Amino acid sequence: MSGRDERLYPLRLTVTAKPLVFGGHALARRLGKTGIPDWSVAETWECSDVAGLSGVVTEGPLAGRSLRQVVADHPQDLMGAGWSGRCFPVLTKFIDATGSLPVHLHADDEAARRLEGQRNGKTEAWHILDAAPGATALCGVREGVTPGRLRAALQAQDFDAVLRRLPVRAGETIYVPGGTPHSFGPDTLVYEIEQTSDIQQHAMRWRMEDGSPVSDAEFDANLDMLMRQVHPESRPDFTPGLRIALGDGAERVFLCASPYFALERWTSAGPLRRSFATAQILSNVGAPVRVRSGDWEGELGRAQTLLLPASCGEAEITGPADVLFGCLPDLDRDVRAPLLEAGYSRRHIAALGAGS
């Protein structure tokens, strides 16, 4: 059957589990995620089209096909009318910061092209699923810190001298533009949404893969590149999101929104119905639910993810439900219009992300 003749349906993808040094067992024990290894897991890449780590369809007629191939065969059926591109543009992860992440940053689009030879950078957002009392995150450079002082403090590993430390609370979200130095943990569970990329520059003397030391020469080269990519003026803050009541106790919360991605959290005691015109990454952060879209129906377990192609158009979820929807939005249609209709100002909407 040719790609043109195939009909898309909700896609389950393989998940990549990352055994990085800051991870633990919270994704399984606290979030209820199954199907991952028993060893310490720091991240699960839920919907990925990063080169070499593209998810593979596990069920139905497209089983065995990579997300990259689905994009190539069905760009507009998957992403929506008028879209074109080489890869799925949004990456989502569950992250277990049982320990603290390394202090690092990701290039923005311009720096990624100029310095990394990549088509795009990596702006991201963190939605906090759970955090211990007193949990914090480092995000952004303190006001008044000069480049020289920043580099010296990073060299000395004195991060609090130059980086902002923010309180972390479950249910809040922070939008982190490329070029912003950051870290979070310990004792924090996060759902992360970001541009499809794996570029990063670290400010640590150890490797996050296994904790082994970084040589002085490599460490200095890493800091040099980080300083070429840093945006010291970027100082994002956590927000509770913008809420819209859907009736019968259901609620829709806009967590972040920008030209790169948008993320919403929907909760309800009864069934939920969502219409859409762009691909939706549906991740379940509550009890198992059933999802129906067109002729397709299936269960979505705890901490599991389903990719809903744009051509599906609508999905119904049984309740009680607590789910996340991530997408590449049309900002006017998918974000501004419903929020303005609900009475929010453009200033409120802009606070969800960069220029939204």
Image: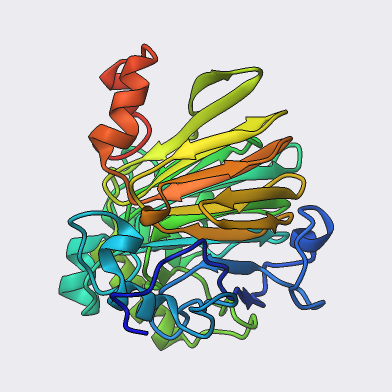
Query: Which quarter of the figure has residue 123?
Result: bottom left
- Which residue occupies the foreground of this view, 207 or 289? 289
* Left/right of residue 316 with respect to residue 287 in the rendered view: left
- Which residue occupies the foreground of this view, 56 or 46? 56
Placement of 158 over or under 323, stated as above or below: below
Q: Residue at x 29, y 58 (%)?
A: 230
Q: Position of residue 297 (x, y in %)?
A: 63, 56
- Which residue occupies the foreground of this view, 336 or 270? 270
Image quarter hosting the N terminus: bottom left
How many numbered circles does the render carry?
A: 0
* Left/right of residue 196 with respect to residue 192 in the rendered view: left
* Left/right of residue 155 with respect to residue 160 in the rendered view: left
Q: Position of residue 333 (x, y in %)?
A: 27, 34
Residue 239 seen anywhere in this rendered image of the structure: no
Q: Position of residue 2 (x, y in %)?
A: 32, 83
Query: Which quarter of the figure has residue 29?
Result: bottom right
Q: Residue at x 48, y 78 (%)?
A: 62
